[in-house]
Amino acid sequence: MFRNQYDTDVTTWSPAGRLFQVEYAMEAVKQGSAAIGLRSKTHVVLACVNKANSELSSHQKKIFKVDDHIGVAIAGLTADGRVLSRFMRSECINYNYTFESPLPVGRLVVQLADKAQVCTQRSWKRPYGVGLLVAGLDESGAHLYYNCPSGNYFEYQAFAIGSRSQAAKTYLERRFGNFNGSSREDLIKDALIATRETLQGEKLKSSICTVAVVGVGEPFHILDQDTVQQLIDAFEIVSEEEVPSAESQPPSEEDAGAGQAPPADQGAGADQGAVADQGAAPMDI
Amino acid sequence: MGSGADSERTLYPYVTGSSVVAIKYKDGILMAADMGGSYGSTLRYKSIERLKPIGKHTLLGASGEISDFQEILRFLDELILNDNMWDDGNSLGPKEVHNYLTRVMYNRRNKFNPLWNSLVIGGVKNGQKYLGMVNMIGINFNDNHVATGLGNHLARPILRDEWNENLTFEEGVKLLEKCMRVLLYRDRSAVNKIQIAKITEEGTTVFPPFSLKTYWEFSAFKNPAASAVGSW
């Protein structure tokens, strides 16, 4: 293990200006199985990979409904994620009681980030070991935020966290330019493809992923397993999968998926996207 | 509960304002109230403003205890300030303010320490007109026209007959003046110094106070006791 004299206490700086405990907490996010989020003007889609702890157990829930207009996908310590989503539910319901209107997503995210920040500045606490993708809809449209154990938060067009999320990010970076105008169905399709990128050649099945949607006229809900399977089949993701995996690429690197040849029918579009994206801002907020 | 706590409650109002009348019209909401403040039944104050803009989208009118209204304005100032401090493009609309005030009023009544007011909340946000009321015990509702106090008895029958959705500003003001004139004649605590305020998508305007033309020579006014047959 890496050890130095500055990594036992959250509140102690290293001479290089780092807080090791906070960085370790952010490392915990990378250990968790992947979670993906992407948004258009009107919809946000969350997807995640479900990993069972053992052959004998079922997997843990990684996507939570917070309110009709907000949901989260988590990566990292699931227990911390549950505590934070309970906090978020409580904030939403209190706001709704007082004002009879939904809590703006951006405000919930700031409250969540402030809560996480406190843990980085108290000697008797530890940072939360979980990253949250917060998807929501409010007056100002659809939003996707990433909340980090450090107390930082960012707004994204599309993002992925968790193990091998780099592969999904590479895919999303190629395509995000078109997301704003995407239909709900296209967003789900891209979410599923991005999810597949994190699987290292394992076959994408509805049993190992969860997909959730929130959008205009559509309260946040998790799609049921049959629907997801039908979507996977309809998009022919499975059949496309056979071709590149036959080349038996060694999935040793994190971004192995990105190196793979893009599926035939997306090749052209993706290439154009990549060219068009050059020089574009990393996120269009 | 100690006897000390008892004396800290509002048991009855001291300085009160009379009716507020408000209607929806073509472009938003119109509200009218006089500027009198009664100390019991003495007309003690003559220029109390009871129509106040709250944030960007809301107009609040109050009848009842003036000091409680001032306390409510302090709550709302803080609420709107905190809302603005987010600086994120979201803002509380009339519906949110109405619901907030409903919670405050009902909460205080449950502590047996009510804020002794009837509040009228009007506003426009995102093209939606909103008009509602809440009273000192937390009863709340929305309607196309509302009136507090004696206005509920004297003004609303007129509004039910004459109000329609497409009233212009001029027609709306005329209708409110008609209501206020009836109140001035028949409500002993009304005074002839009236404010009208409007709120539209463009914002809030509280117009300077004015007086209504009155005619007191009606025979019914001359000897009010003539038709009141009593036993003494």
Image: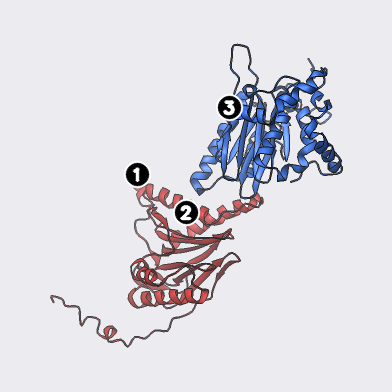
Q: Name the residue under label 1.
A: B2
Front position in the image: A16 or A148: A148
Residue B101, numbered circle: 2
Q: What hue does chain A carry in this figure?
A: blue
Assess whether mark 2 and mark 1 are in contact (beta carbons under 8 angstroms): no
> Taking B109 as reference, is A10 left or right?
right
Residue B28's x, y, as percent? 53, 66
Q: Count every numbered label the image shows and give the total.
A: 3
Looking at the picture, does residue A87 appear above or below residue B221? above
Cα separation, mark 3 vs mark 2, equals 46 Å
On the question of residue A28 being in view, the answer is yes
Q: How far apart are marks 1 and 2 (CA)?
A: 29 Å
The type of colouring in the image is by chain
Please state the horizontal and vertical placement of residue B91, each as a whole percent of the image: 60, 53
Is label 1 in a helix, a strand or a loop? loop
Amino acid type at image mark 1: Gly
> Mark 3–mark 2 contact, CB under 8 Å?
no
Q: Chain B is drawn in which colour?
A: red
Name the quadrant of the N terminus of chain B.
Answer: top left
Disc number at residue A226? 3
Write down the quadrant of residue A25 in the picture: top right
User: At label 3, which amino acid type do we have?
Assistant: Asp
